[in-house]
Amino acid sequence: MKQYMDAIVKPEAGPGLELRQVPVPVPKAGEVLIKIHKTAICGSDVHIYQWNDWAAQHVKPGMTIGHEYVGEIAALGDGVTGFRVGQRVSGEGHITCGHCRNCHNGDIQWCKDTQGVGVDRNGAFAEYLCIPASNVIMIDESLPEEVVSFFDAFGNATHTALMWNLVGEDVLITGAGPIGIMAAGICKYAGARRVVITDLNDYRLDLARKMGVDAAVNTGREDLNAVMKELHIIEGFDVGLEMSGNGHAFNQMLGVMRTGGKISLLGLGDKPIHVDMNYIIGKGLTLQGIYGRKMDNWHQMSYMVQGGLDMSPIITHRFHYTDFQKGFDAMISGMSGKVVLDWSK
Ligand code: NAD
Ligand code: ZN
């Protein structure tokens, strides 16, 4: 085993990232060393690249970033059982305490002491990554590696979408970012009647059409109510998935929900959002905040892909990791879906 490896590191407090040689991590007792095959760039990696307030509060310069990946087990720390070297894996990016009330209850996404891979500790944009064995997810060889590389984000979409019954329901998704588009695919697969997605970015709305939405609406210039009428959505949307983090989008959603409708909220904005409580109260809406993924979402994703859900149209760019700057440029342009980096030498 070599001692040094390539890694994409935040070099100092400020914008930018750097490809550097760093030590290969050594798995301690209970840990697994993963050789990375492919990674995908998340919106939060872009925030770390750009060094916004959130990134400045969490990320220590000198750290390797990245948390969306697929690879194979390279070594097992002492005491790790149930895995073998060479096995294909990914990993849950939230490393949790294991003994708080939510961890005990199986709601690891709400752990009080969660640590983010590639945020609070070294991440996956490297040749090797070390994580606790309890975070390692076995990945069946039948699954396409490129798609598995962004299972972490697909998991956010799964968690948000599968919060409610979708069979025969009309769903509004606000925000056609990669996660909103993946959620659209999940809703169609899960049996929704109509899936309508909104954005202000035509490139992304086109990408959403490839995922089979019934309507992709640019609310900057199109009338959502007219689209609803065309689709025979008479009483409003049954289910809303907020995936933009934008206050206008959320208020628009509240206005077009059916009385008794259900909303899950994933989008994180950089500003507080003002809402008209009359909609929530008068319509008896149920709102659920979504953070991260549930461990079961990893299984649901594998089974949905094996059952025929094709997530590959969301991949718009592929680069070798040495060209990571091109990948970040594509993400920052807004003209991208998922950007996948290949770590083969
Ligand atoms: P993204 O930023 O790529 O997508 C957001 C989309 O919303 C963009 O395409 C943008 O053009 C669109 N948008 C902006 N204003 C809009 C408006 N008024 N109406 C409709 N659309 C509008 O983000 P993503 O990677 O797809 O993630 C989706 C959201 O989920 C982001 O806000 C992200 O921060 C958040 N997120 C939350 C969690 C969590 O655990 N809660 C995890 C991952 C991502
Ligand atoms: Zn915990």
Image (cartoon, helix red, strand yellow):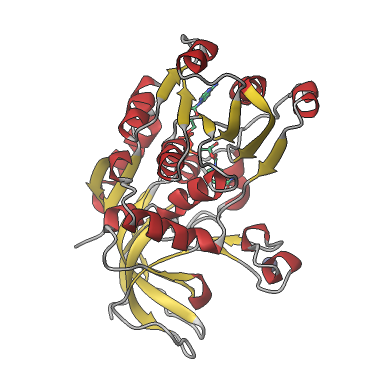
Nearer the observer, 301 or 166: 166
Image quadrant in which you'd find residue 252: top right
* Above or below for 123 versus 97: above
Is residue 250 depicted above or below 98 in this figure?
Answer: above
From the viewer's perspective, is 183 left or right of 337?
Answer: right
Residue 19 seen in the figure: no
Q: Residue visible at 28% across and 81% down?
A: 1
Q: Is residue 325 left or right of residue 58?
A: left
Q: Position of residue 34 (x, y in %)?
A: 37, 72
Counting every numbered tag in the picture gives 0
Whether residue 223 is visible here, answered yes or no, is yes
Residue 278 at x, y percent in the picture = 80, 22
Residue 139 in the image: state x and y as whole percent.
36, 67
Ligand 2's quadrant is bottom right
Q: Which residue lies most toward the left here?
A: 345
Q: Position of residue 156 (x, y in %)?
A: 51, 49
What residue is at 54 percent from the left and 13 percent from the top?
225
Would residue 257 appear left or right of 134 to someone viewing this image?
right
Task: Look at the image and tell me in which quarter the C terminus lies.
Answer: bottom left
| 285 shown above or below 5 | above
Residue 35 quadrant:
bottom left
- Tell me which residue sits at (46%, 31%) in the image: 195
Pick the front one: 180 or 113? 180
Would you identify the image quadrant in which residue 114 lies?
A: bottom right
